[in-house]
C-alpha cells in the first residue's frame, strides 16, 4: 500500500512539474523502435536488419531525449 501511494505521488510530480525520472526515455524508446523496426523489416523482407535498425534508432532517440531533459533540469 505504501508503494502505491509513493508511485501515485511520483505520477503527480511528473504531471504537475513536467519532470521525469533519470533514464525514463532510454527504457521506453528502444521498445518503440523495436516495433518500428519489425514493421520496416517486414516490408523490406529482412526482419533481422529492421529490428537492429529500429533498436538503434530507439536507443539514440531515448538518449537524446534524456540528455535534453537533463539540460532543461527536468530530471529527478
Image (cartoon, helix red, strand yellow):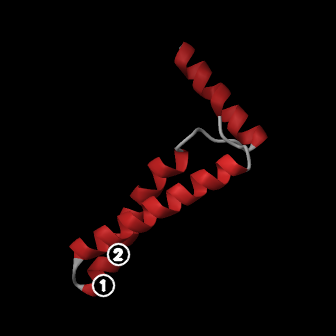
| Residue 64, x across and y down, in percent | 56, 59
Q: Residues within 10 Å of mark 1 (few under 14, many from 20)?
A: few
11 versus 73 height, above or below: above
Alpha carbon separation for disc pair 2 and 1: 6 Å
Tag 1 residue? 43
| Residue in the image at 35% along x and 75% along y | 39
Q: Which residue is mark 2?
A: 39
Image quadrant occupied by the C terminus? top right
Identify the residue shown where x is 22% and y is 72%: 48
- x, y (%) of residue 49? 25, 75
Residue appearing at x 22%, y 80% in the figure = 46
In the image, residue 19 lies at what x, y percent?
69, 41
Is disc 1 placed on a helix, strand or loop?
Answer: helix
Residue lying furthest right: 16
Q: Are marks 2 and 1 in contact (CB under 8 Å)?
A: yes
Q: Position of residue 43 (x, y in %)?
A: 30, 84
Amino acid at each position: 500500500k505504501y508503494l502505491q501511494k509513493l508511485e501515485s505521488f511520483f505520477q503527480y510530480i511528473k504531471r504537475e512539474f513536467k519532470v521525469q525520472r533519470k533514464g525514463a526515455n532510454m527504457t521506453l524508446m528502444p521498445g518503440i523502435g523495436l516495433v518500428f523496426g519489425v514493421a520496416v523489416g517486414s516490408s523490406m523482407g529482412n526482419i533481422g536488419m529492421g529490428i537492429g535498425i529500429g533498436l538503434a534508432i530507439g536507443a539514440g532517440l531515448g538518449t537524446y531525449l534524456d540528455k535534453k531533459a537533463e539540460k532543461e533540469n527536468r530530471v529527478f
